[in-house]
Image: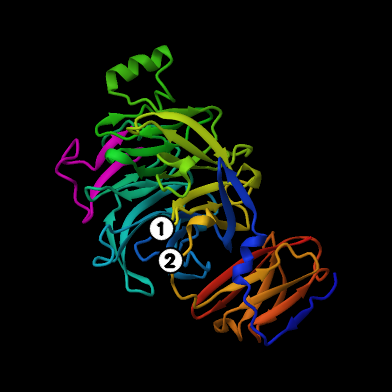
Amino acid sequence: MNSLRFLFAAAFVALLSCQSQAQPNWQVGNTTLTEYDLVTGISLPWEILWGADDHIWCTLRTGQVLRIDPETGNYTEILDIEVMGDGGSEPGLLGMCLHPDFETTPLVYLVYNSGSPWSGGTEHLVSYEWDGTSLSNQVVILEDIEAGGIHNGSRIMITEDGKIMMTTGDTGDGGDSSQNMNSNNGKVLRINLDGTIPADNPNPDSYVWSMGHRNAQGICQGPNGIIYSSEHGQSNHDEFNIIEADRNYGWPDVEGICDLASEGAFCAANNVMEPLKEWSPCIAVNGIEYYNHPSIPEWQNSVLMSVLGGLGGAYERLSVLHMNDDGTAVESEDQFFSDFNQRIRDVCVNPYTGAVYLAFNGPSYPGSGPNTIKEFVNDGVIDNVIDRKQDQFISIYPNPVTTQAKIEFSKSLIGSDLVIHDYTGKVVESKEITSTQMTIEKGFLPAGQYYIQASSSLGTLSKSFIIQ
């Protein structure tokens, strides 16, 4: 391997306006989406959501919460807690949502698992206070939920009427808890923001809103207050459901629609709600988000659904579920971004630009690196939508590197280390940043994909690049 050649230059060259020329494009009907790498090299992003502070909030299954600038990718770690299994399998830090009046009540709600993965673990719904720098002062909302090595759910959201909706899994017990009204597992729970039981729940003494769930890992609200959920099947019958009060969703007695004789009898006797759509074999459906932004007209009135691809892969994608006018039926499905061959864990939407952000968990179960968050945006609609000062940034141009490329830095990064990783996460080079610009030459590393990271007191940045 040739030694890395860094050539420092004092001159400032504006490269940000040129970056888009080198970015990959994706066609959605008549709309062109440009792909940007927002963050690379993080560990198992699980939840991503757009916050009221115009930042992306992200949970990592290993126990961290990140706050990400959507313009630059600069992120800060604002919480680090101990979780079950350290994110190595299915448990860990999972769902997150922000208080609906976040500006005056800056509370962040989180779900995490603690204890032993296979005996006596606990799932916690908690809140933290945001002080502008970090999360602190944990308050327990609900802990009467079992957790295990698999099937913990758990997505959370706050509805238009100010209630927390929380999905829980059966922890792999075969569905015994899912049909047991004395258990909070295998359910969708409805909870007041202070942790009390809503008086208008089906049973005013129970958090249970619906039952008969196996492992629902997606939830969102669409038009007319409709609540949608995506749910993992066993080997067949992944489901996309409308969640209604006091309904049974069948597991383990019913998988998918009520199409077997035994299932028909159970469905008739137990008020079973059939899915709007199902997939066999299982594709491993995950985080969902309702989309109705004009910047991608082809996706308006659709539910965007992340797809992990199952244990064997081959189905990884973003599914676009086109809904009918009142949101009660799936009219068709389109599939995008399967070329990455990467497990897609979650999706969120920029409410200003309509950009879509996807959290990738790598090519294999339960998650392999480098994990990334990518942005897909119609560049034609983003001018002058958000205008925030870019205090910290890195840009690379041209990318891919064919002969020579320039890396430009904000002054905040001078004195920190620039670290280059290959796509296995191995550090292949490290160098102190002494100027706002470096030049790298083709040939200093073998052809392939790499990413760089640099940190300061303002946070961490990462950028992917290709050497041809």
Residue 209: image quadrant is: top left
Q: Which residue is mark 1?
A: 352
- 190 versus 419 height, above or below: above
* Start-end of magenta stretch: 183-211
Residue 350: image quadrant is: bottom left
Q: Residue at x 37, y 51 (%)?
A: 122
x and y, in percent, of residue 302 in the image? 43, 39
Q: Residue at x 39, y 48 (%)?
A: 155
x and y, in percent, of residue 317 in the image? 57, 42
- 87 versus 212 height, above or below: below
Q: Residue at x 45, y 34 (%)?
A: 322
Q: Residue at x 44, y 25 (%)?
A: 255
Q: Are marks 1 and 2 in contact (CB under 8 Å)?
A: yes
Q: Which residue is mark 2?
A: 386
14 or 85: which is nearer to us?
14
Tell me the CA gap for discs 1 and 2: 8 Å
* Residue 454 is at least partly visible in this image: yes
* Tag 1 secondary structure: loop
Specify the amino acid type for callout 1. Answer: Tyr
Does the segment drawn in magenta span residue 190?
A: yes
Specify the amino acid type for callout 2. Answer: Ile
Give the left or right position of residue 404, taking residue 425 as reference: right
Give the left or right position of residue 303, taking residue 427 as reference: left
Q: Earlier in the sequence, mark 1 or mark 2?
A: 1
Q: Disc number at residue 29?
A: none
* Tag 2 secondary structure: loop
**Residue found at the very far right of the displayed protein:** 2
x and y, in percent, of residue 25 in the image? 62, 51
44 or 387: which is nearer to us?
387
Q: Residues within 10 Å of mark 1 (few under 14, many from 20)?
A: few
